[in-house]
Amino acid sequence: MNQQPIDLLPNSIRERCQAGLRTGRYVAAVITAIAVTLALAGYVRYDFSRTEDRHAIVKEHADLVIQMEDRVRTLKRALDETNQAINLQRKIAFPVESSLVLATLINALPDGMTLERLDFDATPRRQTRSSRNRGSSKEEAPPRFLFGELSGFAITDESIAELVTRLQRTRPFDEISLDFSRTRNVRDISAREFRISFRISLDTPYAVELTDAGSQFGGGLPE
């Protein structure tokens, strides 16, 4: 026996039920769409926040690099200025320290000799041109010398001669000459007053010798 369902609902109620179902599906679809949109918005906001963080880190690193580059440029300028000052000092300063000259002269004084005066002159002196250098180039720089005069008194002439010999054996002293030696009374004692002239080449290398009293010129050229 075949059974068939019998729908006793009126058409109006049936249509209302179907409309309610369609509305429910629509509402569910809208809610789903809203949820998906909110989820996408949250992800976008999260990703944007991460992008901002990365951008902040990159900017911080870039600022650090810029600061380091500025520091390098500042140090380079300071280094250039220092090198310029050193080069200027080398041009205007004498390659021979006056303290070395004075220490060497004092250490070379024989016993019983007193140093009264020491004069230095670095003014270039004109030299007579010989037949050899007349044809030399005008651009060649002339030799540089430091001229000095040493005055004092000693007990005997032998002490003066000994001082001259010691200076002749010491580089870079050159052209050492005894200008005069004469009798002088020092505290009612007869002594020998003298003056010695010399020159020091500012272009010739020299050795420095360390002693208990300090530094002085060595006896010869450095190897």
Image (spheres, rainbow, N blue to C red):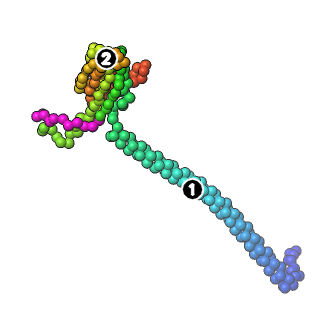
- Reading the chain from its start, which is encountered first: label 1 or label 2? 1
Amino acid, disc 1? Lys
Residue 28 rendering spot, x and y as whole percentages: 77, 71
Q: Residue at x 46, y 49 (%)?
A: 73
Say left or right for 163 vs 34: left
Residue 172 rendering spot, x and y as whole percentages: 29, 26
Quarter of the rendering containing residue 3? bottom right
Amino acid, disc 2? Ala
Tell me, for residue 191, which label it has, or none.
2
Q: Residue at x 36, y 26 (%)?
A: 102
Element type where label 2 sits in the image: strand
Residue 168 rendering spot, x and y as whole percentages: 26, 21
- Residues at marks 1 and 2 touching, judged by CB atoms closer than 8 Å: no
Say left or right for 32 vs 163: right
Tell me the crowding category of disc 1: few under 14, some 14 to 19, or many 20 or more residues within 10 angstroms, Cα based.
few
Q: Which residue is mark 1?
A: 59
